[in-house]
Image (spheres, helix red, strand yellow):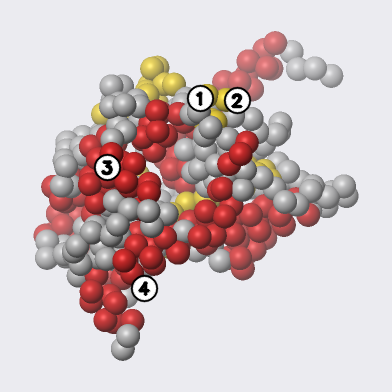
Amino acid sequence: MKPSGSESLKTKITSELASEERDRLSGIVVTARFERFVQRNDIFSRAFWDSTVRSKKTDAFFASYRMDAAPRKGDGFQQRDFALRNASWLMSDIISNRSASEGQREGFQAAIKSDTPVAKQQMLVDDSSEMSREIKKISKFFGADLCGITDADPRWIYASRVDTRDFSEVPNDLPDGMTSVIVLGHEMDRDLVDTYPSALAGAATGREYSHEAAIVMQLAAYIRNLGYEAVPSMNDTALVIPYAIKAGLGEYARNQLVITPEFGPRLRFSKIFTNIPLEHDSAKPRGVQDFCKICSKCADSCPVKALPFGEPKETNNNISSIKGVKKWTSDAAKCFSFWGNMASDCAICLRVCPFNRDFRKIHNRLWLQLALSPWRKFALRLDKSRGDRIKPSRWWAKTRT
């Protein structure tokens, strides 16, 4: 029996109210001017087609990942620093380059192709909550540090993806019936993060991209072996930050990162789109945004002033940011120009963040409780002496002892 018109309307209204409540918990404020993001407009894609972004320095930035650009003088920018950074990206590069002739940079401008067919026999899942627990257990087995699950909200899926042969827009297709997004968090090495900005520090990013490529593909293969569709994804296909927040892994911060109670902002995220029956997690607002409203350490420390001050607001004049969302928004072009000058990535905003702590230590856990409480101003005063850059040469010396 088909639902009547009034029943269909009631279902639609209930769904919309539930979506609004999930947004409220997530701290995501979507306005009437919302538009799905066009991936061609992300700053890395623009560096190939947009003359206002592309320059000799940005070309040299990409060349440095092939060791084509000569290392420059300075602690953290010598040959061994670039060598380690580039080696850390190797496994991710192997995956991302395997479909280059088809214009698909897997994991970045296209979803990762599955090497495992969906099993013909589908395992019965009669308890979605138990299946979610199993998925989280398997994600940890393969090496993920965090795992959360949320609904496959279509708003955060790119309106189109990029053909890397000419950087034109092409359809961003997912299999029908994707109901869930499994979000995985991968911790970056804290000692390396402390050396940002440097080519050496870039190894912390590259290592996790290589780790997550393997982990996300293996977990997707497990689900496909159970007879369900699973699409492994890294920076491709959709914006991962809204999914990570909705999956309860953390909260959005002024520095454009997700702050987690386990690792602060020191994470990379990957995701899997799937139709296996799963119970969804909920966002867990703890007070990070209230802390960020009184803290501007990341914005103060940004060398090119690419990070915003003040309250979150809607910004529609930056094509590298999603339209119609009220949030803290960086100037991506300014940020990337600094990357080009260094021939490496910059994460000063991550390094200086007061939440960039080792929360295995009790004093840092106590600080976190203060930071997320009405005592947040006191917590901020306690943090003033933290976040100084460690010389990359000290990291090398430490590995030899």
- Amino acid type assigned to the residue bearing label 4 in the image: Arg
SS at badge 3: helix
- Amino acid type assigned to the residue bearing label 1 in the image: Ser
State the CA–CA distance, disc 4 to disc 1.
Answer: 46 Å
In which quadrant is the N terminus drawn?
A: top right
Q: Which residue is mark 1?
A: 168
Left or right of residue 81: residue 294: left
Q: Say which of 148 and 335 sits in front.
A: 335
Q: Which residue is mark 4?
A: 360
Residue 299 sits above or below residue 71 on the image: above
Count neighbours of disc 4 (C-alpha within 10 A) and say few if under 14, some if 14 to 19, many if 20 or more: few
Residue found farthest to the bottom: 401
Q: Residue at x 60, y 25 (%)?
A: 171
Q: Residue at x 70, y 48 (%)?
A: 114
Q: Are marks 4 and 1 in contact (CB under 8 Å)?
A: no
Count neighbours of disc 1 (C-alpha within 10 A) and say few if under 14, some if 14 to 19, many if 20 or more: some
Query: Which-is-in-front pick, marks 4 and 1?
Result: 1
